Image (tube, helix red, strand yellow):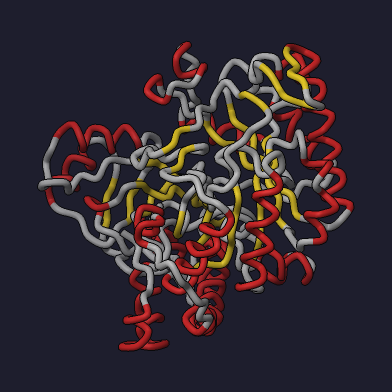
């Protein structure tokens, strides 16, 4: 599990303890959102995204988000959605262990802020729709902003009620909004949305999809006009909207969306969704990557998405919500900003070194003989380093490396192979299948048994670059595979 700092850690180790923990792993994954840094965008945009783990790849190494489940009501039905309560074992949108009132949410948020110095963003993502259940959303944000004025506020919405809320969103300084847009052709929408509830009546069929589309486009335009950053989520549904998402991307990019996140359909009969029960499959990892690659010409893509629960707490790729249920939260809470302030001092130093490592890796790769790019998976607990045991990895971060540089292309979830010891053939077979198309895995440590099994499958597993920065380790491995020496840069 990724390490989060406690008040005890700060008291005993202070800034140096925090820096050491970052090097060992303070984030559960390594890349997301825009990979650009402060030199690549307008200063006012950088200020908005630099501490937001979903809008900036660089920020994701260091900062955490929290969702509070205060908005249970929803005004549309999606064929891929089934909202569940008191379900701790499922990690997908719409699932929560407990619904909160705004007052309860305030207590919980302050408790997290006092314990998790990486906490920087508070989001409301349901489990219904944040803009439809607006009274609870607004009250929650107002309470939190009063106690923790520096926390970033963001919300997720299907967009149907969004145009009615934009003025209040702007007034409340909610400067990040996610809209789920799965179509710009209402005919395709009829295959995704059985009904919507709008203007006090239920609409179905083509008329429902047309209304939803028009409201989504209006809301997007209104947010962009007010300089609010918009991330568009689109669920990739093979055979229904997979090819159509190219047009969705063109439209939302043209209207000013900051990021586009193509997410795979989660389709499991056990979840009780229409698509799950009717056998609609989700996309394979290679299909998702191929679509994302087709959209990578000038579009900022978010490739890291974990499709978080509506009560998620912690760093992306982990969920510590069960540690902050209401029975574990004190009745009376007072916000103490000292831990978060100290953490930011450490991060300010760490992120500069990491950015320099990225630039050095790009410069070294540019000198190498041009080869077809290859995929390298990394076992990481975060902090931008190769710092996790192969057998402990619940997911692998996958990068593409070649003469043009290193780019993050996605994550592959996996069963851990060290549950009760090495060598369970079924588990290793599952990992091998998960890493289809990957040439190498870099990790902090690996045993002989899994190393040999992976080698037999054509995948190299190396712990030679343990605790290096990810970019430096990948560059070192790639150069060694080509028999090339890395030129040292000043």
Instruction: Work out whether residue 335 or residue 7 is closer to the camera in this orientation and state it.
Output: 335
Q: Residue furthest right?
A: 225
**Picture coordinates of residue 484, whole percent (x, y):** 41, 61
Q: Residue at x 50, y 81 (%)?
A: 336
Q: Residue at x 82, y 49 (%)?
A: 166
Q: Quadrant of the rendered structure where residue 434 is?
A: top left
Q: Residue furthest front?
A: 331
Can residue 204 be seen here? The reply is: yes
Determine whether 89 is above or below 330 in the image.
above
Q: Quadrant of the rendered structure where residue 168 is?
A: bottom right
Count of marks placed on residues: 0
**Picture coordinates of residue 402, whole percent (x, y):** 52, 51
Where, quadrant-wise, is the C terminus in this rendering?
Answer: bottom right
Determine whether 314 is above or below 110 in the image.
above
Where, quadrant-wise, is the N terminus in this rendering?
Answer: bottom left
**Picture coordinates of residue 364, whole percent (x, y):** 52, 66
Q: Residue at x 37, y 34 (%)?
A: 436
Determine whether 123 is above or below 88 in the image.
below
């Amino acid at each position: 599990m990724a390490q989060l700092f406690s008040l005890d850690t700060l008291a005993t180790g202070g800034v140096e303890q925090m820096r050491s923990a970052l090097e060992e792993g303070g984030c559960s994954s390594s890349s997301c959102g825009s990979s650009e840094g402060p030199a690549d965008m307008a200063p006012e945009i950088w200020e908005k995204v630099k501490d937001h783990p979903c809008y900036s790849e660089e920020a994701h190494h260091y900062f955490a988000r929290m969702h509070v489940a205060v908005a249970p009501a929803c005004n549309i039905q999606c064929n891929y959605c089934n909202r569940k309560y008191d379900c701790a074992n499922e990690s997908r949108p719409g699932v929560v262990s407990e619904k909160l009132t705004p007052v309860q949410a305030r207590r919980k948020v302050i408790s997290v802020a006092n314990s998790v110095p990486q906490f920087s963003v508070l989001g409301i993502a349901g489990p219904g729709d944040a803009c439809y259940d607006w009274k609870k959303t607004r009250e929650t944000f107002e309470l939190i902003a009063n106690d923790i004025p520096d926390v970033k506020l963001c919300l997720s919405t299907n967009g149907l009620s969004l145009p009615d809320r934009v003025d209040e969103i702007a007034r409340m300084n909610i400067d990040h909004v996610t809209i789920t847009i799965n179509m710009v052709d209402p005919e395709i929408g009829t295959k995704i949305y059985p009904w919507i509830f709008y203007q006090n009546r239920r609409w179905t069929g083509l008329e429902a999809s047309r209304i939803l589309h028009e409201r989504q486009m209006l809301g997007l335009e209104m947010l962009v006009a007010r300089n609010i950053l918009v991330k568009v989520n689109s669920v990739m549904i093979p055979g229904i909207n997979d090819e159509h998402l190219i047009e969705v991307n063109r439209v939302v990019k043209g209207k000013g969306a900051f990021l586009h996140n193509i997410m795979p359909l989660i389709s499991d009969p056990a979840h009780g969704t229409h698509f799950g029960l009717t056998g609609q499959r989700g996309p394979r990892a290679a299909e998702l990557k191929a679509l994302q690659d087709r959209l990578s010409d000038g579009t900022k893509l978010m490739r890291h998405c974990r499709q978080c629960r509506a009560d998620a707490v912690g760093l992306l790729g982990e969920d510590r919500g069960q540690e902050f249920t209401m029975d574990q939260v004190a009745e009376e809470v007072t916000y103490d900003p000292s831990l978060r302030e100290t953490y930011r001092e450490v991060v300010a130093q760490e992120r500069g070194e990491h950015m320099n490592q990225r630039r050095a890796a790009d410069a070294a790769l540019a000198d190498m003989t041009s080869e077809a790019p290859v995929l390298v998976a990394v076992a990481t607990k975060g902090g931008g380093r190769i710092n996790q045991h192969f057998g402990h990895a619940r997911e692998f971060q996958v990068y593409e490396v070649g003469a043009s540089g290193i780019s993050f292309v996605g994550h592959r979830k996996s069963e851990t192979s060290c549950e009760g010891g090495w060598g369970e053939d079924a588990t290793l077979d599952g990992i091998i299948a998960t890493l289809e198309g990957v040439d190498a895995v870099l990790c902090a440590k690996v045993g002989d048994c899994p190393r040999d099994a992976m080698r037999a499958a054509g995948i190299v597993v190396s712990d030679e670059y343990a605790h290096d920065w990810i970019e430096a380790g990948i560059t070192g491995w790639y150069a060694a595979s080509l028999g090339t020496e890395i030129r040292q840069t000043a």
